[in-house]
Structures are given as C-alpha cells and as structure tokens.
Image (cartoon, grey):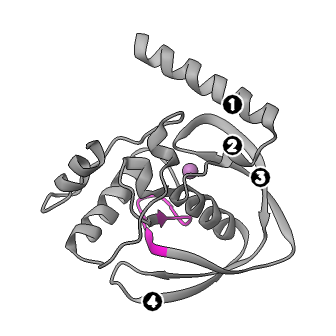
Amino acid sequence: MLLDRIRGCAYFQPMTVRPILTAPDPRLQAVSMDVETVDAEIRTLVDDMAESMYEADGIGLAAIQIGVAKRVLIIDLDQKEGKKNPRAFINPKIIWVSEDMAVFEEGCLSVPEIWDDVERPARIKCEYLDRDGKKQILEADGMLATCLQHEMDHLNGVLFIDHLSRLKRSMAIKKLIKAKKLKAVG
Ligand code: NI
C-alpha cells in the first residue's frame, strides 16, 4: 500500500520535502490514527512536514497531506524572514470550545487557489503531545485557534471546503478537478 511505502521511507533519512496531496484525492478523506510513541520516526515525520510546509509557503500542515495517516500536525504562524518556529501537535484533542464564533478566510495547501470564509469557535483549549512526547495543554484564540481546528479537521478527513454551502463546495471541487486535468496535460 502506498501509505505504508511512504511511511517506511521515513526512517533514518535527512529532512525531505515530500509532495503534498491535493483534492480531490481519497487519501485526504482518511481518518488518521493516533501516534503510539513519539520516537525518531515521528520526529523525522515532523521535520519532513516542516520542510514540505515551508517549501509550499504554508502556515500549517497535517501528516495526511503528505500521505501519512497519523495524527500529527505542524503550525508556524510567526514566520518572518529566515526565522522558523514550527510547532508540532501530536494526537491533538479539543477539550473545550468557546460559544463565540470567529470567521477567517481560509485556504489550504491541499485545496490550491481557493479561499473562503469559514466560521469556527473563536477560542479553543486543546491537549496534545509535543515533539518530545510531552503532554501539553494550550488555550488558543485568533488565527491559531482557527488554524488548529482546520488542521485537526484534516486528521478526520475533513477539508475546509466541507464547511461551505453545497453550492460553493461543488464549485470548488469542479475547479480543483479542472486544475488537476490541466496539470496532467501540461
Ligand atoms: Ni489544510
């Protein structure tokens, strides 16, 4: 299986930029599995995800976007020239959400050239393991709260366009299919 092959390669390799899957792709609908141990393989995965995210000019990435169905995501919202500070969230779980909502325009490396407003809880509290396997609890608001929810959706096979109206979603999917066909020809 392709997923296993990609995962197998993760062992003992230097940081690698891995290709990012784009919708529609059935792999992006997979529900990712919990990480059992935060070991060298997971840290390599985290490093590769960071490389792949920076290469694609993204601010967040879930492992499934590079074809690995594990509950791992990375976020870096403070990218300034040459300064990188990727944060890893392993087995993240939302343990509280605020009643007040916030709207942000979202985009996604797996949904190229499409941006739209999505409403989500404005603040959340989440529990996760960091890159060292230590349990952390974080209360987030603003962009970070939205970004965490967007990335956690990926772990459940959900894309931001799944939050749009049926009409907007089907228009987005048509656009994505067309872009894929053009890419295949060109
Ligand atoms: Ni995304």
Residue nearer the viewer, 78 or 140: 140
Residue with the mark numbered 4: 135
Q: In 3D space, how far apart are the residues under numbered discs 2 and 4 (Cα atoms)? A: 31 Å
Q: Residues within 10 Å of mark 2 (few under 14, many from 20)?
A: many
Residue 186 appears in the rendering = no
Mark nearer the N terminus (2 vs 3)? 3
Please say if the residues under marks 2 and 1 sit with CB atoms less than 8 Å apart: yes
Residue 126 position, x and y percent, is 60, 80
Residue 153 position, x and y percent, is 60, 59
Q: Nearer the viewer, mark 2 or mark 3?
A: 2
Which range is magenta? 74-91
Residue 118 position, x and y percent, is 77, 52
Q: Residues within 10 Å of mark 3 (few under 14, many from 20)?
A: some
Tell me which residue sits at (36%, 78%) in the image. 131
- Helix, strand or loop at disc 4? strand
Q: Residues within 10 Å of mark 1 (few under 14, many from 20)?
A: many
Residue with the mark numbered 3: 118
Mark nearer the N terminus (4 vs 1)? 4
Q: In 3D space, how far apart are the residues under numbered discs 2 and 3 (Cα atoms)? A: 9 Å
Tell me which residue sits at (27%, 42%) in the image. 2
Q: Identify the main secondary structure in magenta.
A: loop
Residue 132 appears in the rendering = yes
Residue with the mark numbered 1: 172
- Helix, strand or loop at disc 3? strand
- Helix, strand or loop at disc 1? helix
Residue 172 position, x and y percent, is 68, 31
Please say if the residues under marks 4 and 3 sit with CB atoms less than 8 Å apart: no
Q: Quadrant of residue 15?
A: bottom left
Mark nearer the N terminus (1 vs 3)? 3
Residue type at mark 2 is Ile
Mark nearer the N terminus (2 vs 4)? 4
Can you tell which mark lies on residue 161?
2
